[in-house]
Image (cartoon, grey):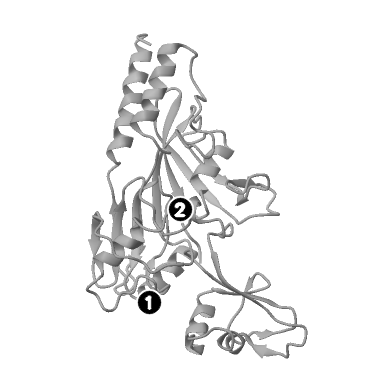
Amino acid sequence: MSTEEILFDEEQCADENGMYEHFRFVADKGQGLLRVDKFLVARMEGTSRNRVQQSAEAGCILVNGKPVKSNYRVKPDDVVTIVMDRPRYENEIIPQDIPLDIVYEDADVLVINKPPGFVVHPGHGNKDGTLVNALAYYFRNNPDFDVSDPRLGLVHRIDKDTSGLLVVAKTPNAKTSLGRQFHDKTTYRRYNALVWGKVEKDEGRIEGNIGRDLRDRLQMAVFPNGEYGKHAVTHYKVLERFGYVTLVECRLETGRTHQIRVHMKHIGHILFNDDRYGGTQMLKGVSTAKYRQFVQNCFDVCPRQALHAKTLGFKHPTTGEELHFNSELPEDMQKLIEKWRVYSTDKEKGEN
């Protein structure tokens, strides 16, 4: 199942496609041929064969790193893992009364506009105060919604410091349907980003595999030759130019970890104030004290990567209706863009 860009604070055990290993079993050398569903039921207390089969159908059971169906026959030395699109919750999820900006809700789905700085999943260093904790509280009186059930909940993720739209599945059918749409690239996702430099082309397409950086595991990188990482495509369009920075719209064709951040860096346009990928340096402009102070003021106004998941569209899992949602840029990005707009205008007048 494909995922949106994910939280790096939580993803120390995630692969480049954003999947987290929850369980691992190694078949011994004397293992006779045995269906993988029976193999797992025998080793996992309290797990039904039906639940294992559902996991296999969802692509969550891997043998030697590749997804298998429930009728796969385990052989000696096979490594069988169970992966999910979220970290393993080591502790009980505590419901917390954290306000949610709900854009839309019905019996099947919930669409949320996430503010910047809001962690999505509990994980290392973020055991509570997350969106999942907020969902546990919001659904506290709904007996059909268990926030720990992997068949429900968030279908995709965005980074802690990225703002914007997320969809939550309230039923197993909804999660299966939405997950398939993300996997099949039929969802509609557009982001606004402020990037360093003058983007010369009015629009373009970026293609290059994305995988874990071989020198720094806290970063992702582009591997153009296709020998490593996962296939990724981003389409961009210039919305406004401000001289030393450019406002762009990015449309995701795929959903890889940090896809927009990594792809834009790959073509020479790091996201403004993106600490992980070098955007907190003054990458373009003049060396005057006045300009340096201006850039610092911009960093202070928007103290995170300038990226917002503005538009989200998908087919309703029950009715089949095409749903599209749009969210306004958060205040910090609005102020940042306005500062650059004024600076650019003044510069053209010769006032900078």
Which of the labelled discs sits on residue 172, or is there none?
1
Label 2 sits on what residue type?
A: Gly
* Place of residue 262 in the rendered image (x, y in percent of width and height, measured from the top left): 55, 43
Asked whether the viewer can see residue 322, the reply is: no
> Nearest the camera: 261 or 302?
302
Q: Is residue 124 left or right of residue 268?
A: left
In the rendered image, the quadrant that contains the C terminus is top left
Callout 2 touching callout 1 (CB < 8 Å): no
Q: Is residue 130 above or below residue 169?
A: above
Residue at left 39%, top 56%? Answer: 120
Q: Is residue 82 left or right of residue 162?
A: right
Crowd tier of the residue under label 1, counting other residues whose Cα lies within 10 Å: few below 14, some 14–19, many 20 or above:
some
Asked whether the viewer can see residue 235, the reply is: yes
* Place of residue 240 in the rendered image (x, y in percent of width and height, measured from the top left): 38, 31
Label 1 sits on what residue type?
A: Pro
> Nearest the camera: 311 or 28?
28
Residue at left 51%, top 29%? Answer: 200
- Distance in Å between CA atoms under marks 2 and 1: 29 Å
* Place of residue 344 in the rendered image (x, y in percent of width and height, measured from the top left): 37, 20
Disc on the earlier residue, 2 or 1 = 2
Asked which secondary structure carries label 1, the reply is helix
Q: Which residue is mark 2?
A: 125
